[in-house]
């Protein structure tokens, strides 16, 4: 048996032990885990520094380095996410009644774990804790295959988690980190369909395409985050500016950062000169359509087909549209089903935007940066699904379960 086969079978076997744990027992483990992450913050940061040193030597891009970097605050936030997961309702075992059928049988549905989830990710060491905690609470084993960029950080976090599992007499295989980032092992991992139930890749578009193409196991896809802010003719322009600057500049290398500003023509002449000044101060590079370009001191003029790029840096596209319908058409063509935002004082317009736009998260008058499992009340997220089977948007506890039918009878037979 190969290393990968052994890891997958051990994870599958270990996951079955979670079925006998009560919600209270699982929560106790998670609270202790959060405490351990904080207590061993310095050890984790030392491991992370090894990854950052290697990233510098390998000249990784700024967005990748940002995702890779841990700080004491980020570890504290990681631990806080674990605590939030402990506080959330446990979906496992919850039931809903479908009713008594003409035959007399009573039909219900019960939420149950998926089994074993495999996370494949690049420079995101926080995924190790987020995925481990979410899968544990939802009754799933998890196999974590991080990229070589974050391997030291992932192993350090996993070591803390294993210490807590051992403390409670639980198998380390519940949270497994593949210790070798070899691509051949990744290919083998994606063939373990007898023991792994779902694969969730998190990283660049190339990684998602590679996993989708090569996996024998169902894959949750999240190709990229091309997020738009549409500023309507009835927008509060002060709020619009706040949403723009927060969405674009607070943290550029994340998938919920803004990549395109869409502006109604009726307010373009008033709003865009202020945008020009604000984005110049923030050192944001501008790519604009021909209608928007003359409002900016410096702008690269985009053709119709050049929108839809995920910049992941201090760079943004700007487009002026004729009306609300034009904004919808632009987002439909260039959006990535991740997060879309409207700024407007008209509640009917906001509601129509939220109804019509096909994205996993659609916001009215709130920053795209809230498109995050922790910010949406999920404690943390294991990934963001931009396809619709079986989840859409940030995936929390419930998204890591499915439903089975429960049928109760009194001897009924079918005639």
Image: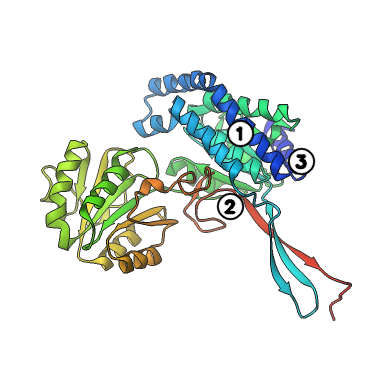
Can the viewer see residue 303? no
* Among the two numbered marks 2 and 1 on one chain, the one whose residue lies closer to the N terminus: 1
Residue at image mark 2: 399
Residue 329, compared with residue 26, is above or below; it is below
Q: Which mark is residue 185?
A: 1
Q: Position of residue 255 (x, y in %)?
A: 40, 44
Q: Residues within 10 Å of mark 3 (few under 14, many from 20)?
A: some
Element under label 3?
helix
Q: How many marks?
A: 3
C-alpha separation, residue under disc 3 versus residue under disc 2: 20 Å
Element under label 1?
helix
Q: Nearer the viewer, mark 3 or mark 1?
A: 3
At 54% across and 33% down in the image, what residue appears? Answer: 79
At 67% across and 59% down in the image, what residue appears? Answer: 403
Q: Position of residue 60 (x, y in %)?
A: 38, 28
Horizontal side, residue 89 vs residue 318: left or right: right
Q: Nearer the viewer, residue 330 or 246?
A: 246
Horizontal side, residue 317 vs residue 98: left or right: left
Q: Nearer the viewer, mark 2 or mark 1?
A: 2
Element under label 2?
helix
Q: Which mark is residue 17?
A: 3
Extreme right residue here? 411
């Amino acid at each position: 048996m190969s290393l990968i086969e052994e890891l997958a079978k051990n994870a599958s076997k270990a996951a079955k032990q979670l079925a006998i744990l009560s919600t209270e027992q699982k929560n106790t483990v998670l609270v202790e885990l959060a405490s351990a992450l904080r207590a061993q913050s310095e050890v984790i940061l030392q491991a992370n520094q090894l990854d950052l040193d290697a990233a510098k030597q390998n000249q990784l891009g700024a967005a990748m380095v940002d995702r890779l970097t841990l700080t004491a605050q980020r570890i504290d936030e990681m631990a806080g996410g674990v605590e939030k997961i402990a506080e959330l309702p446990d979906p496992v075992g919850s039931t809903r009644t479908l009713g008594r059928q003409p035959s007399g049988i009573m039909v219900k549905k019960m939420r149950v774990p998926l089994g074993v989830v495999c996370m494949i990710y690049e420079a995101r060491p926080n995924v190790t804790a987020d995925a481990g905690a979410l899968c544990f609470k939802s009754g799933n084993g998890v196999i974590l295959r991080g990229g070589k960029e974050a391997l030291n950080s992932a192993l350090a976090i996993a070591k803390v988690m294993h210490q807590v599992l051992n403390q409670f007499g639980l198998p380390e295989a519940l949270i497994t980190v593949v210790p070798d980032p070899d691509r051949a092992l990744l290919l083998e991992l994606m063939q373990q369909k007898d023991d792994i139930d779902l694969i969730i890749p998190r990283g660049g578009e190339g990684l998602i395409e590679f996993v989708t193409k090569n996996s024998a196991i169902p894959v949750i896809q999240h190709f990229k985050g091309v997020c738009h802010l549409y500023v309507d003719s009835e927008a509060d322009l002060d709020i619009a500016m706040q949403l723009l600057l927060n969405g674009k500049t607070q943290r550029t290398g994340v998938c919920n950062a803004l990549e395109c500003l869409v502006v109604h023509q009726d307010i373009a002449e008033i709003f865009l000169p202020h945008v020009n000044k604000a984005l110049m101060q923030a050192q944001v590079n501008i790519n604009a359509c021909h209608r928007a370009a003359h409002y900016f001191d410096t702008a690269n003029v985009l053709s119709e087909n050049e929108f839809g790029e995920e910049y992941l840096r201090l760079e943004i596209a700007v487009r002026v549209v004729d009306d609300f319908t034009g904004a919808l058409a632009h987002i439909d063509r260039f959006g990535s089903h991740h997060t879309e935002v409207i700024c407007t004082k008209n509640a009917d317009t906001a509601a129509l935007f939220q109804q019509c736009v096909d994205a996993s998260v659609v916001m009215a008058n709130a920053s795209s940066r809230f498109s995050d499992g922790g910010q949406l009340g999920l404690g943390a997220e294991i990934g963001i699904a931009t396809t619709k089977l079986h989840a859409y948007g940030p995936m929390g506890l419930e998204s890591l379960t499915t439903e089975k039918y429960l049928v109760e009878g009194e001897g009924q037979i079918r005639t």
